[in-house]
């Protein structure tokens, strides 16, 4: 009989470190597996392995956290065929669900039921393939789009997309990527202050963000 649950790398309780909900207590459900290998990936440990869990077991582990918000992340959470069942089960017990996705998998069935945070891959990620464009039509104004900026060229590229006025969300996030020793591939990296000053100088209608959880608990700490 085929397994009807999901492969889960970790479930934990922490503050949301990114997005417009930064600082809000969340339950995090990190699903195993990703089809991309971004240069700045900070969750390489979620590419393989994981624990098989039923939807009921996942809900039971989340319940003691006593939170309103749940984030489905990865890896890429939409690659697993039972993710929609998990989303529906979470919504049935009144959780507000956010989903972090790279936008290469269709969000059509998920977007009506969750806050989508779509990471548009910049050239510096080495995974910029443009597939996100197929998902723009499914995004709601209340969803969010994120750009991880690894270089000046990334910034210029993302700036032009923002200025095109084709992004349908109210929240557009720019996040600086600092070089990391365990990066799958080298990238230039940018300083947070430089990125903040560029946003101000160019009058971009975006939200600058740093990863709060890394500021609080360190760059390489899991489960935060």
Image: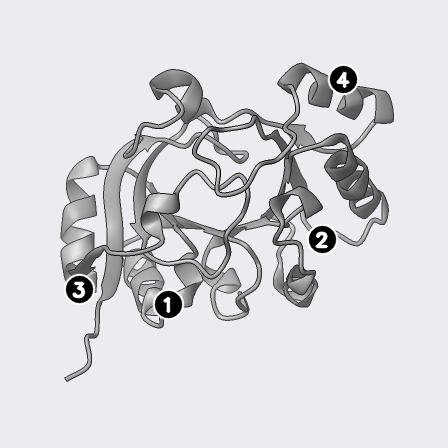
In which quadrant of the rendered image does the C terminus lie? Answer: top left
The residue where tag 3 is placed is 54
Q: Give how far apart the Cα atoms at labels 3 and 1 are.
A: 13 Å
In the image, which disc is placed on residue 168?
2
Q: Give how far apart the Cα atoms at labels 4 and 1 are.
A: 40 Å
Q: Give how far apart the Cα atoms at labels 2 and 4 are.
A: 25 Å
Picture residue at 24% right of the left edge, 56% below the top: 49
Picture residue at 49% right of the left edge, 27% below the top: 211
Q: Earlier in the sequence, mark 3 or mark 1?
A: 3
Relative placement, left or right, of 39 versus 54 is right
Picture residue at 36% right of the left edge, 53% below the top: 47
Relative placement, left or right, of 70 versus 106 is left
The residue where tag 1 is placed is 84
Q: Could you say which is closer to the camera, residue 60 or residue 154?
A: 154
C-beta proximity under 8 Å, tags 3 and 1: no
The picture places residue 113, in percent across and down from the top left corner, at 45, 60
Classify residue 182 by image quadrant.
top left
Q: Earlier in the sequence, mark 4 or mark 3?
A: 3
Instruction: Look at discs 4 and 3 and give the one toward the viewer.
Output: 4
């Amino acid at each position: 009989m085929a397994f009807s649950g999901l492969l889960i790398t970790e479930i934990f309780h922490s503050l949301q470190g990114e997005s417009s909900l930064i600082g809000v207590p969340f339950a995090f459900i990190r699903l195993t597996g990703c089809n991309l290998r971004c240069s700045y990936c900070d969750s390489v440990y979620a590419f393989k392995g994981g624990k098989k869990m039923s939807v009921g077991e996942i809900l039971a582990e989340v319940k003691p956290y006593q939170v309103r918000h749940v984030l489905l992340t990865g890896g890429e959470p939409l690659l697993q065929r039972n993710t929609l069942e998990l989303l529906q089960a979470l919504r049935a017990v009144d959780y507000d669900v956010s989903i972090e996705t790279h936008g290469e998998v269709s969000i059509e069935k998920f977007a009506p039921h969750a806050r989508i945070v779509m990471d548009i891959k910049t050239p510096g990620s080495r995974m910029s393939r443009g597939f996100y464009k197929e998902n723009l039509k499914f995004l709601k104004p209340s969803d969010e789009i994120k750009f991880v900026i690894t270089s000046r060229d990334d910034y210029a590229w993302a700036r032009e997309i923002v200025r095109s006025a084709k992004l349908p969300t109210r929240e557009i996030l720019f996040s600086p990527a600092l070089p990391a020793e365990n990066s799958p591939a080298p990238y230039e990296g940018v300083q947070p202050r430089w990125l903040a000053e560029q946003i101000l100088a160019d009058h971009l209608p975006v939200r600058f963000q740093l990863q709060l959880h890394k500021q609080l608990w360190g760059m390489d700490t899991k489960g935060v």
